[in-house]
Amino acid sequence: MKMPILIHPDPRLKKVCAPVDDVTDEMRKLAEDMLETMYHAPGIGLAAPQVGILSRLIVMDCVKEEGAEQEPLVMFNPEIVARSDEQNVYEEGCLSIPDQFAEVTRPAEVEVRWIDMDGRERRAGMDGLWATCVQHEIDHLNGKLFIDHIGPMKRQLITRRMQKLKREQARG
């Protein structure tokens, strides 16, 4: 089921999310609905707070090539356990901040630990777009947006654009 995505500024996007205690059927269904929402948007990542659920759950799929096999990844309680000293700069966007982009510097490689859909602990090293995306989505779980990594002038400009967009949407 496709879910509505919250648009910045929304106070729920600034909250730290609670850990997922148990990977239940309800949580698996939420993950599947989030994947459907992400693919439909279209995006490469989505965090539970973006759909109004304040739980530590993210979904990702950084395969963008036309016709390539999807590689959906569902992560409950993801955490970065190691970061490279080397940095990468990517132009990031966000489904909660539509049509706005900014260059963000993050570690080029990360090692991530999480719980999968079967309740098993997993670990993986990630680099490139996968590393950027997982850091962006984990930021959401900690109440941070990609615009929190950029200068205050550009952040205010983007926030004003989103306030205007929300007013226009409210008017229909």
Image (spheres, rainbow, N blue to C red):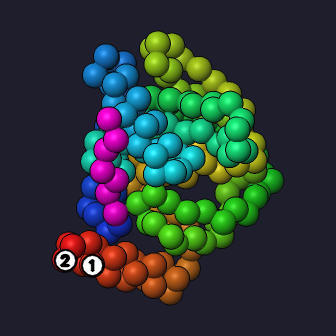
Position of residue 119 relative to residue 127, above or below, is above
Left or right: where does residue 99 sit relative to residue 166? Answer: right
| Residue in the foreground of this view, choosing between 15 and 10 | 10
Q: Specify the quadrant that holds the C terminus.
A: bottom left
Instruction: Kindly check if marks 1 and 2 are in contact, taking CB atoms under 8 A apart as contact.
Output: yes
How far, Cα to Cα, is label 1 from label 2?
5 Å
What residue is disc 2 on?
Answer: 171
Where residue 109 appears, as percent x and y from the top left, is 74, 44
Q: Specify the quadrant that holds the N terminus.
A: top left
Position of residue 171 relative to residue 76, above or below, is below
Q: Residue at x 46, y 19 (%)?
A: 117
**Amino acid type for the residue under numbered disc 1:** Glu
**In what element is the residue under mark 1?**
helix
Q: Is residue 3 visible?
A: yes
Q: Magenta residues?
A: 1-7
Where residue 16 appears, as percent x and y from the top left, is 34, 48
Left or right: where does residue 168 sit relative to residue 99? Answer: left
Q: Residue at x 36, y 18 (%)?
A: 23
Q: Is residue 147 magenta?
A: no
Where residue 115 appears, as percent x and y from the top left, is 49, 22
Q: Residue at x 60, y 72 (%)?
A: 102
What residue is disc 1 on?
Answer: 168
Position of residue 134 relative to residue 96, above or below, is above
Where residue 25 appears, as percent x and y from the top left, is 31, 16
Q: Is residue 5 magenta?
A: yes
Q: Residue at x 34, y 41 (%)?
A: 2
**In what element is the residue under mark 2?**
helix
Q: Residue furthest right?
A: 86
**Amino acid type for the residue under numbered disc 2:** Arg
Looking at the magenta stretch, what is its main secondary structure?
A: loop
